[in-house]
Image: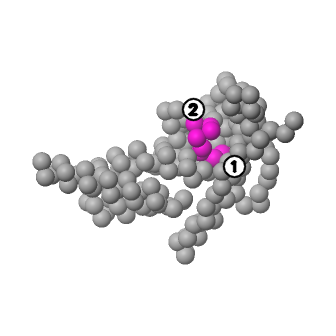
């Protein structure tokens, strides 16, 4: 019984630390926790659960056919698959290893456009309907993670009402 409680406490601690990991550093935090906890299986299990949410919340940039696409809640197709609204491709993403697999042409067509351009960072836009309201969702990732200083700068999420 005590061992099981100890394992639950470890899992809770691991999840808390993984959720706080800075963008661009998730994989390194997983490795560090594996070394500290000395239970690679438990750390990898928890990281697999936390990784998807962490990557979507931080607009993690990935490459699909040479284009940068952001992982967001808005282009999540479920089952770790994500949609590139411009090229109409979907891929599966391994959140633990940070790699895309199985790119394929996706049959769903979304009405999307790029609203803005940032000199550093990436932007994806999506048109969503909430009842009678039409919204544009702009997901902008501009993390400027500095390996030397270990600092990361955040991101913003915004909903823009459609102008008639």
Q: Which residue is mark 1?
A: 158
Q: Is residue 133 above or below residue 142?
A: above
* CB within 8 Å, label 1 to label 2: no
Q: Residue at x 69, y 52 (%)?
A: 140
Residue 102 percent coordinates (x, y): 55, 34
Residue located farthest toward the front when viewing the structure as drawn = 132
- What segment carries the magenta color? 67-77
Q: Residue at x 69, y 49 (%)?
A: 158
Which of these two is toward me, 74 or 108?
74
Residue 156 percent coordinates (x, y): 66, 55
Residue located farthest toward the right when viewing the structure as drawn = 164
Residue located farthest toward the left when viewing the structure as drawn = 1
State the separation of the CA atoms marked 1 and 2: 21 Å
Residue 110 shows in this picture = no
Q: Residue at x 35, y 61 (%)?
A: 33
Which of these two is toward me, 150 or 154?
154
Task: Label 1, secondary structure: give it.
Answer: strand
Task: Label 2, secondary structure: give it.
Answer: strand
* Magenta stretch encompasses residue 140: no
**Among numbered discs 1 and 2, the one appearing first in the sequence:** 2
Q: Residue at x 66, y 41 (%)?
A: 65
- The quadrant the C terminus occupies is top right
Q: Residues within 10 Å of mark 1 (few under 14, many from 20)?
A: few
Asked which quadrant contains residue 14, the reply is bottom left
Q: Residues within 10 Å of mark 2 (few under 14, many from 20)?
A: few
Q: Please state if 161 lies on the left or on the right of 62 as rendered.
A: right
Q: Is residue 131 above or below residue 5?
A: above
Q: Which residue is mark 2?
A: 77
Q: Please state if 135 lies on the left or on the right of 76 as rendered.
A: right
């Amino acid at each position: 019984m005590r061992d099981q409680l100890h394992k639950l406490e470890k899992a809770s601690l691991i999840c808390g630390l993984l959720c706080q990991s800075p963008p661009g550093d998730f994989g390194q935090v997983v490795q560090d926790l594996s070394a500290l906890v000395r239970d690679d299986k438990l750390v990898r299990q928890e990281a697999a659960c936390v990784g998807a949410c962490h990557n979507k919340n931080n607009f993690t940039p990935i490459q699909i056919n040479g284009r940068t696409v952001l992982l967001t809640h808005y282009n999540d197709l479920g089952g770790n698959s994500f949609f590139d609204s411009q090229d109409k491709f979907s891929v599966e993403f391994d959140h633990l290893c940070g790699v895309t697999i199985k790119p394929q042409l996706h049959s769903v067509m979304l009405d999307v456009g790029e609203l803005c351009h940032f000199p550093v960072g990436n932007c994806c836009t999506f048109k969503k309907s909430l009842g009678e309201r039409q919204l544009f969702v702009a997901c902008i990732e501009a993390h400027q993670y500095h390996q030397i200083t270990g600092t990361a700068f955040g991101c913003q999420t915004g909903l823009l009402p459609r102008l008639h």
